[in-house]
Amino acid sequence: MFYACVRAVVALCLRLFYRVKVNAPALEPDGPVLFVGNHPNGLIDPALVFILTRRQVTFLAKAPLFRMPVIGWLLKGLDALPVYRKQDDPSKMGGNEGTLEAAKGALVQGRAITIFPEGKSHSEPGLAELKTGAARIALSAAKEGAPVRIVPVGLTYAEKHVFRSEVLIDVGPAIDTRAFLAEDAGAEPDAVRALTERIAEGLRAVTLNLEQWADLPLIQLAEQLYAFKQGGALDAERLRLWARGVQLFRAQEPERFEGLRAQLAAFQRRLTLVWAAGPEDLTIVYRPGNVVPFVVKNLLALVLGVPLFALGLGVFWLPYQLPRLASRRAELDVQATVKFLTAFVVALAWWGALTAAAAVWGGAALAVATFVVVPPLALFTLYFAERWEALQRDIRVFFMLGNRARLKALLLADGERLASEVERLAGEYRPRLDATDQGSTQVARPD
């Protein structure tokens, strides 16, 4: 019951804090499963597993978290297992044997476990070197007959520390641990290394894994242009291919890479100047038939929504500011954790305070009404703030491009030219990426 309640509350709050997208198979894995993920965002990363699966999951978390007042209580209530790291306290490293044994036991019983094999959260653009703990746990359980499957989980944040930014949870194909079992004790270290590399390969397939953060706008624009040229939607899997392709392109043709990067950066700057989100905005045709309904609909939304929005801003201004202030001095990879936990505590306290104030000033009836109205008012304020930002951008694009046919035509022609170049580049490098993948698979395959 405790786990189900925590899962429901945390999953709801995460969906309010982020715009969460999940790319996973329709059927959840059953039996013994080890979820492994990249670790860019502190305690938010394991919390997102609540959204990914309805199964009860055993978490492995660093030992110092168990000593924190609220987080420690939650982790113990969720039956999480402590991991003792050398950088925290070298004298307690021996405790890991008990943790690994308990994790193995959970898998043998057919349960699900979550572990982040990088060993720490970080803000680097690429996947860090993996620890061998995940492989050792999985292999020890498989050795006792458990059909353990390892499921790679990629977490990609648009802006991980920004409220209402996007996060993609991408689930890769399961890895059958039994294929990596050693024939004898002497071969076990090689089996652990081979499985660890296979896990890294699975994680690289569901994460961007950039060489440098400066490449992110480049690959995002490349995907926008490719989708624009192909006439389809943006695709997360293709975005990861762009990330890998950029590394290969830079290594094999550095001069051509720098030239194209300069052209894409210049085009992105021109799009920004006219408030266009992407090349697709350049194809919008402004006619009375689509402009008038747009204006009427949004005027009605403003007339009806602004009074409620203003009320929401007045009521929730203080609790909205506190999480931002609390996270100012935090490291980037834990800023979202601080914001999320602060917002959760402050929101509950503020809700209770408003209800209590209504009871004092207006009696029980007003208190009940306040208790019921506050959550939907908060949600409406959040929705309207997002809608207002989108409307402002649409208006700016209209005034920048609506009556400037020549500017729009020049930008569109430039975008189409770059889209053709990007499409040609994709055709050139996809076979090379496929060849690289095949070579990696052959190297990682155990004997």
Image (tube, rainbow, N blue to C red):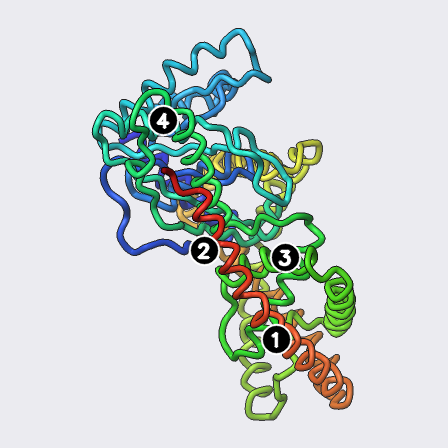
On the rendered structure, is 211 left or right of 376?
right
- Measured in 3D between alpha carbons, the distance from the residue under mark 3 to the one under mark 1, in whole angstroms, is 15 Å
Name the residue carrying label 4. Answer: 137
Callouts 1 and 4 close, C-beta under 8 Å: no
* SS at circle 2: strand
- Measured in 3D between alpha carbons, the distance from the residue under mark 2 to the one under mark 1, in whole angstroms, is 30 Å
Name the residue type under label 2.
Answer: Lys
Question: Quarter-wise, where is residue 337 in the image?
Answer: top right
Query: Which disc number belongs to residue 21?
Result: 2
**Residue at 31% across, 25% down:** 140
On the rendered structure, is 269 left or right of 118?
right
Looking at marks 3 and 1 on the same chain, the residue that comes earlier in the sequence is marked by 3
Q: How crowded is mark 3: few (under 14 residues within 10 Å), some or many (20 or more)?
A: some
Q: Residues within 10 Å of mark 2 (few under 14, many from 20)?
A: some
Q: Where is residue 115 in the image (x, y as percent from the top left)?
A: 42, 32
Name the residue carrying label 3. Answer: 248
Mark 2 vs mark 1: give the one in front: 1
Q: Decide: is 89 above or below 263.
A: above
Which is nearer the eye, 19 or 22? 22
Q: Decide: is 348 above or below 94.
A: below
